[in-house]
Image (cartoon, rainbow, N blue to C red):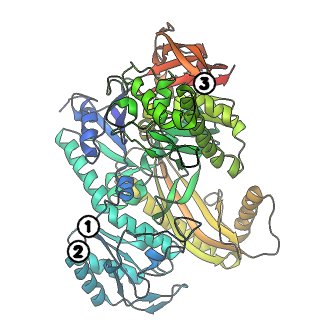
Amino acid sequence: MTSKQPSLVVGVDVGGTFTDLFVLDEASGTARIVKVPSTRGEEARGFMNGVARVADSAAAIATIVHGTTVGTNALLERKVARTGIITTRGFRDVLEMRRRDRPQTWGLRGSFTPVVPRDLRREVDERVLADGTLHTPVDLDQVRAEARALLEAGCEAVCVFFINTYANPENERLAVAAVREIWPNAHVTSACEVLPEIREFERCSTATLNASLQPVVGGYLSRLESDLRAQGFGGELLVVQSNGGVMSRQTASDLPVRTALSGPAAGVIACAAIARAAGFPNAITGDMGGTSFDVSLVAQGEAALAAQTAIEFGMVIRSPMIQIETIGAGGGSIASVDASGMLQVGPESAGSVPGPACYGRGNMRPTVTDANVLLGRIAADRPLGGGLLAALDAEKSRQAIEEHVARPLGLDVHAAAEAILTVANARMAGAIRLVSIERGHDPRRFAYMPFGGGGALHVCAMMREVGVGTGIVPRYPGVTSALGCVIADMRHDAVQTINRPLTEVDVADLQRRIDELAAACQRRLDSAGVRFEAVREVIALDMLYAGQTHTLPVELSDARGKPLTVDSIRAAFEAAYAGAFGRVLDGIPIRVMNLRYARIGVRPKFDLAVLAPEGAGSVEPLGTQRVFHEGKWHDAVRYARLELPVGTRIDGPAILEQPDTTVWLEPGFHAEVDAHGNLLVRPS
């Protein structure tokens, strides 16, 4: 054990290829990054390998904040625990019926296999009506019998899901208590505890996925914490949620469904903080990894939140989460020519193993990375990932593109490689338009912020395609998600269905519910044992006009400042509705569906200026490199990006290299190093 007070705060993001660590020393005010190979299927091993490189002893670490993809991967690969459901008689097929949607909009084919098979979905006698009236008391003997039957069937986890528990949870509470008495582990999920909200499918799906993840995520985090403690770690292990906040290890084990977009959410939080510090409260983020391109929008310094998402078709999670659009356009996305002679890029990916053709690991189909290597935008002789791959084989990239793209299209191999990037850029630009133009935002008023290992190679192309005036390449693009883990505040969200006309809302009861949700969320904050600089709250109502199906979130800014009234709620709704749709609808009754509450523990922040380069640095070129761009060759000057001092201006064509990424600065663009170490890219 060290005699010094632990001073390190470490953010850890486990990706499919690399495990990234951002290390902040609060005592010295310095920061550094660590990058180690991930160990797929044994994520904890890669995690611990990274921690071992942070300090001589884990005792020097005060806090570890983890962005994990364990839950997401388990759902995508269907490697979840064998789970059973105990539900109201007549409702065992809610999970399978969904919303009567289908994987493909057109055609007669399509199938869906629910996480829980039908023989493990058991029914019992009980019924609560939609208004909360207890129609049939729950038969606890049946509940116990079905729980024992599920155990005999090999179930490791169970979800208790009764109809209309958002209006009256008493039957479900009694049933859950009875199941917990006989269940041999803690993996018993109550749907009304996870999501006490109207709409039975969304509640059933969210709670069932939570139950199926508890053994997987809970076991992983418990082993991880045990390994850390064995190495002398005495601090707090926190986990990033999909809403961009963090939670304690225990809360993450209880509610693993909230980690579904943990890693990408952390990256957006980091980008929002970096963009605000750089003077750009409005930013569009683009995370380009090996397999996917994840896009999100930050408006007025805040990331947009969505009420729910689908991990894949039919696997719906209803929980507040950062709004992220994902397409299959990463560095490993495979390029091919289809039967109609059209060039396609993605969604199939070469992944990290075997990886792009230039990795020399057996794949001989061309990828986006191969196109960048062949065109000279990535130096083949430069170690990848800080030395994790010694060199790239440009000849294999040439062979793959020649065989699979150039010959079928009758193109020169370099023109074919550029065509691959043109298609990939068009797809990524489409995703940017989806989160901006299609939601009423003008992308020209936003900065574009690429991160991930491949994002900076395409920053100028995205600016050209979408019309963005400024690009912000953060200091460490490849470890931005790990940085976000360190920045993120602790946040807990809660919801309670009201489902009444506004004129019938009991304001005193509404205030009581707000106080109850505040107390429950505060207990979650307290359980983490973390110091906060402040605690703030967000109170909102989901509201709509009678006859509508989609609700509008209405923030109640004065819920704590002065007494709530029906008139003040109506005024807030009409202002929000007019802001969203340009007008209000006179004469139509207003309905209140849900109360939403978020309690945010603001963690101490560090000055992002610690990321800025120190000392005189160096603007000496590393040499020049031939780059093929827009049909001709250019001599691009190579620089060591992290050596460039504040205020340096670099004109394109240029290549700026660093261990975690490469920046390709096209002709007609220039970049300047700002006071936080970011590269601000603009047209010349």
Q: Earlier in the sequence, mark 2 or mark 3?
A: 2
| Residue in view at x 65 percent, y 39 percent | 282
Is label 2 or label 3 in front? 3
Quadrant for residue 78, please give it: bottom left
Q: Earlier in the sequence, mark 3 or mark 1?
A: 1
> Pointer 3: residues within 10 angstroms few (<14), some, or many (20+)?
many
Out of 239 and 402, give the one closest to the viewer: 402
Left or right of residue 571, residue 459 in this image: left
Residue 81 sits above or below residue 91 on the image: above
Q: CA distance from mark 2 to mark 3?
A: 57 Å
Q: Amino acid at mark 1?
A: Ala
Quadrant for residue 661, please give it: top left
Percent x, y of residue 206: 44, 66
Percent x, y of residue 94: 46, 78
- Say which element carries label 1: loop
Name the mark on residue 186. Answer: 1
- Say which element carries label 3: strand
Out of 429 and 565, give the one closest to the viewer: 429
- The answer to whether one can see residue 647 in this image is no
| Residue in view at x 32 percent, y 52 percent | 249
Q: Amino acid at mark 2?
A: Trp
Percent x, y of residue 388: 31, 27
